[in-house]
Image (spheres, helix red, strand yellow):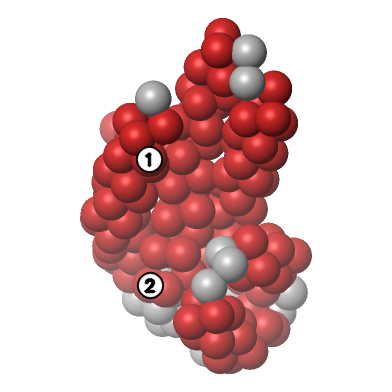
C-alpha cells in the first residue's frame, strides 16, 4: 500500500507543477490586460499556485494515507501521515496569500518549500518585491490595492 501512496504523491506533484504553470500564466495575462503598468508577478503567481495546487493535492493524498493507516492500525504511520497532511494544508493556505501578495505568506511559504534553490530564488525575488508585499505603491500609475482587485477569480471560474 505504501508503494501506491508514493506513486500518488509523485503523480500529484507532477500534476501540481503542470497545473500551476498554466494557472500562473493565466493570472499574469489577466494582470497585464487590466493594469499594463503593474510590475509582472510571474514567479509569485507560479510559487503561490504551486503551493495551493500542490498543497491541496498532496494534502488530500496525505489524508487518504492517514485513513488507510487508521484502518490498518498502524498508529505510528497515522501520526506521520497526519503531520504530512497538516504540513501541506498550511502550505496551501500560504500559497493563497502568496498569490494575494502578503509578506508573511511569502516568508512562511519560502521556509515550507524545503528547497535551498527555492530559498535563494525567493530571497532574491522577495528582496526586489518587499515594498510591494507591504502595500507600498510600486508603479508609476498603479498601486498595490489595484493589483489586489485583479486577483479576484473571474465569474467564469467559479
Q: Which residue is drawn at 55% across and 80% down?
A: 116
Residue 5, compared with residue 71, is above or below; it is: below
**In front: 105, or 142?**
105
Dot 2 and dot 1 residues touching (CB under 8 Å): no
**In front: 118, or 98?**
118
Q: Name the residue under label 2.
A: 42
**Relative to 115, is 144 on the left or the right?**
right
Please indicate, yes or no, whether residue 46 appears anywhere in the rendered image.
yes
Q: Quadrant of the C terminus?
A: top left
Q: What kind of element bears circle 1?
A: helix
Q: Where is residue 78 in the image (x, y as percent from the top left)?
A: 66, 26
Query: Upstream in the sequence, badge 2 or badge 1?
Result: 1
Q: Position of residue 107 (x, y in %)?
A: 69, 70
Q: Name the residue under label 1.
A: 6
Q: Which residue is drawn at 63% across and 21% down?
A: 74
Residue 25, compared with residue 3, is above or below; it is: below
Q: Residue at x 56, y 53 (%)?
A: 95
Instruction: Give how far apart the Cα atoms at labels 2 and 1 are.
Output: 30 Å
Q: Residue at x 31, y 56 (%)?
A: 17
**In front: 146, or 61?**
61
Q: What kind of element bears circle 2?
A: helix
Amino acid at each position: 500500500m505504501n508503494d501506491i501512496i508514493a506513486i500518488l504523491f509523485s503523480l500529484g506533484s507532477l500534476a501540481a507543477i503542470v497545473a500551476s504553470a498554466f494557472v500562473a500564466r493565466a493570472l499574469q495575462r489577466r494582470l497585464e490586460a487590466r493594469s499594463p503598468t503593474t510590475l509582472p508577478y510571474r514567479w509569485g503567481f507560479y510559487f503561490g499556485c504551486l503551493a495551493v495546487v500542490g498543497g491541496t493535492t498532496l494534502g488530500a493524498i496525505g489524508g487518504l494515507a492517514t485513513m488507510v493507516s487508521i484502518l490498518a492500525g498502524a498508529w505510528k504511520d497515522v501520526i506521520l501521515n497526519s503531520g504530512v497532511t497538516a504540513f501541506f494544508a498550511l502550505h496551501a493556505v500560504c500559497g493563497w496569500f502568496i498569490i494575494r501578495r502578503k509578506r508573511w505568506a511569502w516568508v512562511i511559504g519560502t521556509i515550507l518549500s524545503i528547497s535551498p534553490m527555492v530559498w535563494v530564488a525567493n530571497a532574491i525575488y522577495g528582496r526586489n518585491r518587499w515594498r510591494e508585499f507591504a502595500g507600498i505603491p510600486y508603479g508609476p500609475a498603479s498601486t498595490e490595492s489595484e493589483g489586489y482587485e485583479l486577483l479576484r477569480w473571474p465569474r467564469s471560474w467559479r
